[in-house]
Amino acid sequence: MSDLITVQNLTLQFRTDEGLITAVEDVSFRVRKGEVMGLVGESGSGKSVTAKALMHLNAKNAVYTPESKIILHTDEGDLDVLSLRKAADMKVVRGGAISMIFQEPMASFAPAISIGKQMVEQLMLHSDMTKKQARSHSIEMLDRVGISDPHKRVDQFAFELSGGMRQRAMIAMALSTNPKLLIADEPTTALDVTIQAQVIDLMHDLVKEFDMGIIFITHDLGVVAQTCDYVSVMYLGRLIEKGPVREVIRDPRHPYTQGLIDALPKLDELDKPLTPIPGDIPSPLERPKGCVFNTRCSKIVGDVCMNDLPRDVQVDPVHRVACHIYNEEGQA
């Protein structure tokens, strides 16, 4: 499989009244065609900020270090996303090669404009379709994501649709420009479990049909296990573990990943109390020295955890972890 996007040494800070605040630090990963990569972590881990960086959507006070690279691989050649400055240049990325589904569709759809008009507008912006062709294509996409009576729904407003139908309409809108990479930012969080299952099945179908890549952002490891091929675990702006999803779920190596899995309720042990990770994720204003997880970790190995950043080591051919428990050869 060929690469769609490569992220190298991404470090992102925000200028604030308190000074530069680090939100993402030295993050590297890649997504390939036909692959779903899960980006997992608690709220405040930096998942959405990382995803927005891929489309240059972060606020104007965002500062990227010179080492940060986001390379989009297109049919016309490689494109350095962070080098783009003009809005016209961004069209290649935003809604062109990359589309994004947000957690709450009501925040994405304009409430006073019909869904169809919004879909038609973006198609006319990113293609040479006429208004009639764009409307016809919008109806076809609504039908393809399983919305009943698409000829009727295309003229409705977002508030007239159910939560699951709004999410499907958001997916249809994101896919209508035929992107190479789809970023799904917690698309199932606000949905009930039956609609969640339908959206997950739809994601699988889309990957097969369009041979696209998906970055699936969530804090739900159950959804990740059902949806993703690979998973990257993020904590306080750093990637601390990554590998094939089944490998990471079955044999988590980082204490944080182990804590996330232990915190999941188990249907076969209903009387067993839940075991949450102690403490809270620190504020970026109070970023710990050394390993970013040292304030909550139960497996501290000494002063090294408090003073030094752990190296990213390979614990097997496809599984990497950043933890002082492991040496350079990946042995505990």
Image: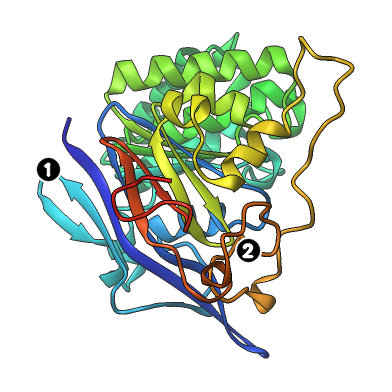
Secondary structure category for the residue under label 1: loop
Residue 219 in sight here: no
Identify whether 258 is placed above or below 82. Answer: above
Identify whether 67 is placed above or below 167. Answer: below
In-front residue for pair 39/268: 268
Residue shown at 52%/28% (left/top)?
249
Give the percent coordinates (x, y) of residue 51: 47, 52
Q: Which residue is mark 1?
A: 75
Residue 226 in sight here: yes
Q: Is residue 70 left or right of residue 302?
A: left
Q: Quadrant of residue 64?
A: bottom left
Image mark for residue 322? none
**First in sequence: mark 1 vs mark 2:** 1
Q: Is residue 132 left or right of residue 185?
A: left
Q: Which residue is mark 2?
A: 294
Residue shown at 36%/56% (left/top)?
312
Q: Is residue 299 left or right of residue 131?
A: right
Q: Where does the N terminus fall, quadrant-wise? A: top left
